[in-house]
Image (spheres, rainbow, N blue to C red):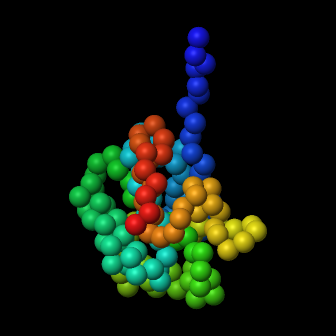
């Protein structure tokens, strides 16, 4: 007889600070909604040209529905210039109003913790979680 498997929920986002929200979003608290996480770097041309506009569009199209968009600033290069203060200015200038978390620095190495946990290969990366909190998509590009 097959074993009954308990659903496995992916790890929480490991964030040092949230911007654009007074709350601390968590994947567990957002179960029941579809969650889209857009992982980006503010100096990533593909993120600025394609990924962030796509994330902004999702917030507009699905406003008031059971879909939440979160940003994740996951810095794996140029650490000295991509500070939280610079990110706040960037988000303001690009009029990004959805919550954005800052991925915790890696230990050891340059890759941030959430980036490591989800085996992201770069930015932009799109993570999509279903209403049960299961990861359905982890897509680079």
State the residue lying farthest toward the right.
108
Residue 29 % position (x, y): 51, 45
* Residue 136 on image: x %, y %: 43, 45
Image quadrant where one finds the C terminus = bottom left
Q: Residue at x 27, y 65 (%)?
A: 57
Image quadrant assignment for residue 120: bottom right
Q: Is residue 135 visible?
A: yes
The front one of 62 and 111 is 111
Q: Position of residue 98 (x, y in %)?
A: 40, 66
Q: Report the residue that reaches farthest toward the left.
A: 61
Q: Is residue 27 above or below residue 109?
A: above
Look at 44% across and 63% down and name the residue there.
Answer: 140
At x 63%, y 87%, the residue is: 80
The N terminus sits in image quarter: top right
Locate residue 13 relative to residue 61 in the image: left or right: right
Tell me if residue 6 comes above or below residue 91 in the rendering: above
**93 vs 14, nearest the viewer:** 14
From the top left corner, tell me how far across and down residue 19 is, in percent: 50, 70
Q: Is residue 19 above or below residue 48?
A: above
Q: Residue furthest bottom?
A: 81
Q: Please give the name of the residue rendered at 48% of the width and 45% of the height, measured from the top-left corner.
A: 135
Residue 101 placement, left or right of 96: right
């Amino acid at each position: 007889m097959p074993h009954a498997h308990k659903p496995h929920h992916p790890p929480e986002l490991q964030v040092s600070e949230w911007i654009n929200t007074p709350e601390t979003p968590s994947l567990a608290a957002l179960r029941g909604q579809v969650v889209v996480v857009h992982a980006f770097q503010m100096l990533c041309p593909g993120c600025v040209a394609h990924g962030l506009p796509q994330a902004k569009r999702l917030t507009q199209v699905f406003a008031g529905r059971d879909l939440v968009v979160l940003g994740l600033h996951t810095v794996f290069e140029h650490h000295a210039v991509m500070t939280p203060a610079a990110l706040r200015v960037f988000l303001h200038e690009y009029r990004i109003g959805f919550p954005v978390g800052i991925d915790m620095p890696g230990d050891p190495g340059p890759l941030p913790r959430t980036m490591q946990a989800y085996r992201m290969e770069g930015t932009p990366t799109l993570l999509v979680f279903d209403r049960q909190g299961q990861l359905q998509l982890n897509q680079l590009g």
